[in-house]
Image (tube, grey):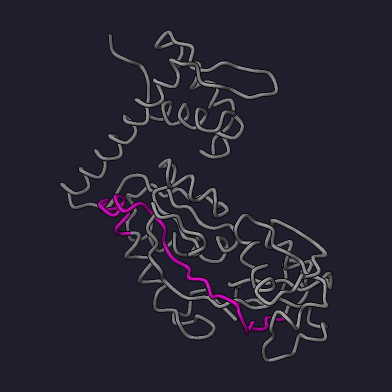
Amino acid sequence: MALRITLRQLEYFVAVGEHGSIALAAEKVSVSSPSISAAIAQLEAEFGLQLFIRRHAHGLSLTQGGARFMEHAREVLERARALNDLANDISGKVRGPLNVGCLVTFAQIVLPQLRRGFVDQWPEVEFHQFERDQQAIFDDLRSARLDIALTYDLNIPADLAFIPLIELPPFALLNETHELAHRESLSPADLADYPMVLLDLPMSADYFLSFFTAMGIDPIIAERTRDIAVMRSLVANGFGYSVANIRPLSDLAPDGRRLRFVPLTGPVKALHLGLLLHDTARQSRTISAFIDHAQDQITPLRAPGLQVRANTPLRRA
């Protein structure tokens, strides 16, 4: 009897198995929770198996059979991806699905235009973008939910490969009336007595705070936020300074108030913006095309302002 299942159903099943929650799985694969639930129900009905134990307020747990089923589902999904790559190699075409992640702190600045140029060049690619924090990028690359990601070289694990594109030194963000706003440069010591608005994302927060701990300074953290736009507006409205590595061309916060950007000096490590992936992913023609495109568009941007191309909005202080 022919099986009436789809690769999409297997993808949704694996996402639930990995996250133990339909809601979390729906967020990860960017579909609705009812779509996930329907896919699980269809798989269980088709195979006559109970794949999950549903515990109220504790999410879903794989049954013993469900755990074995998920191992094989992962293999099927990986072989399907390999078939797509093989077809591209045989035909010499760049096409098929491409799941690209981007660090949430700069996704709005870098990814949309990079994506526009890529899909214009390769219209047969089904491009899907995902904004994630650093740890989620690592997890999604390892589970093959992402094919490649744009991020910083921040705590990169040994099982992932990083391709640097451009160096971005850190700078301080200040309200335009802040008494330090018109300095040529600042050190962490200069900021020690002022309130700080911390961009409190996994790994990113530790990186920013390391500037101060290296000098034996405890910064005065007045506000914390996980949203970079909120951070900018808090700074622009005088709730404290902040620290970042990348900014748009505009000096205005989202609410229209003006910001100042001052380079940081001292024991502050620059970050590299680059591409992160598994070494095996480089065998894909589509992924290789995206790497070439990103290198062509971002790597040449080295001068202050990052304005090698007139239509490129990427900029650093």
Q: Residue furthest front?
A: 216
* Quarter where residue 176 is shown: bottom right
Q: Quadrant of the C terminus?
A: bottom right
Residue shown at 56%/34% (left/top)?
26
Question: Residue 264 at x, y = what percent?
Answer: 64, 82
Q: Quadrant of the N terminus?
A: top left
Question: Residue 259 at x, y = what percent?
Answer: 73, 77
Residue shown at 54%/48% (left/top)?
136
Residue shown at 69%/62% (left/top)?
199
Relative vertical location of residue 214 with respect to residue 275 in this rendering, above or below: below
Residue shown at 61%/79% (left/top)?
267
Q: What stretch of residues is rendered in magenta?
A: 260-289
Question: Residue 89 at x, y = what percent?
Answer: 19, 49
* Quarter where residue 182 is shown: bottom right
Q: Is residue 78 magenta?
A: no
* Quarter where residue 66 is shown: top left
Relative vertical location of residue 142 with respect to residue 167 in this rendering, above or below: above
- Residue 245 left/right relative to 69: right
Question: Residue 13 at x, y = what percent?
Answer: 47, 26
Of residue 255 and residue 44, the one placed in the foreground of this image is 44
Of residue 126 and residue 157, the one placed in the foreground of this image is 157
Of residue 158 and residue 154, the one placed in the foreground of this image is 158
